[in-house]
Amino acid sequence: MLCAGLVVALMLVSRQGSQVAVKELSGVYHAHAVPMGALGQALDVLHRSRMRIVLAMETSYQRQALEHFDRMLSLEAEVDALLAPVFDGLTAPGDQAQIAAFQTAWASYREVRQRIVELYREGDRAQAITEFRSNLAPPFDAASAALGSLLAAQVEGSARAYAHAREASASSEQLTLAVGGLGLALLVVLGLLLARSIVQPLHAVTRLARTMAAGDFSQPVVVDRGGEAGELQRALADMQAQLRHLVCRIRQSTDSISTASAEIATGNQDLSSRTEQAASSLQQTASSMEQLTGT
């Protein structure tokens, strides 16, 4: 029962260690890996939207420019959709500062971009190109830099969190190994004690059985164990009592036989003596008859 309890305890400790490691790594994934993926994708879409307005300014075909503008607006909406849940989940002061910087630059960029699109749609392509070349790059670069800094901060935070998770996992593994080693040592000790509690009574019973086999029934069988060992001791005690009684009866029978044999031997001696006396008497009688016959 105790061994089973130790095994269950070891399993619980190992499971708890695994759960701690999984929890730490899961926290790293949700806190950093997911935002990193979204920020990287948003940064890519951001540059693709910028490329669309560049293509629109370079083409001389209005229809193609308008198609580029429409695609640019779709990509900007995709950037907003990617960043909204990320920004909601980043609450660290440093992250909030980078988010504020990006939002300010992103708003400035879209304001300039909106003027460029309106000028182009109104037919003032030259002024739209001038506005594009003069005022669009600074806010876009600022927005891109803020988003890149935010992504770099997440990468750095992810590295620190992963290292911390690995340390927690290593500590959990060490604890599991330590508890496992202790449990194994306890199991060995308990196994030795259990074996000793079984073997010692068996050795004692074996010695008594050999003593009785040699004909010595003087050593008493002590019943001081429970369970199967106690049953064996009681059985040996009963066998010793029965054998002692049987030997006692055999000795009594042997004594009786010895007495009877002595009496028979005495009777035989008396009979032999009387037979010799009778033979001597017959011989004397025969001699007397011969003497009488001769005269």
Image: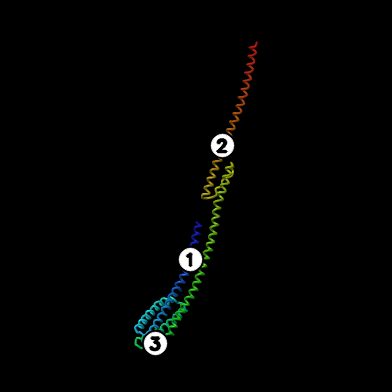
Q: Position of residue 143 (x, y in %)?
A: 43, 82
Q: On the rendered structure, is 202 left or right of 140?
A: right
Q: Could you give the CA–CA distance between mark 1 and mark 3, rounded to whole angstroms?
A: 60 Å
Q: On the rendered structure, is 279 left or right of 230?
A: right
User: Callout 3, which amino acid?
Assistant: Ile
Q: Is residue 63 above or below residue 26?
A: below
Q: Position of residue 295 (x, y in %)?
A: 65, 10
Q: Residue 129, which numbered label? A: 3
Q: On the rendered structure, is 133 left or right of 167?
A: left
Q: Residue 251, which numbered label? A: none
Mark 1: few/some/many CA within 10 Å (<14, 14-19, 20+): some
- Secondary structure of the residue carrying tag 2 is helix
- Looking at this rendering, what residue extends furthest in the top direction? 295
Q: On the rendered structure, is 255 left or right of 152?
A: right
- Secondary structure of the residue carrying tag 3 is helix
Q: Residue 18, which numbered label? A: 1
Q: Position of residue 10 (x, y in %)?
A: 50, 61
Report which residue position mark 2 lands on. 250
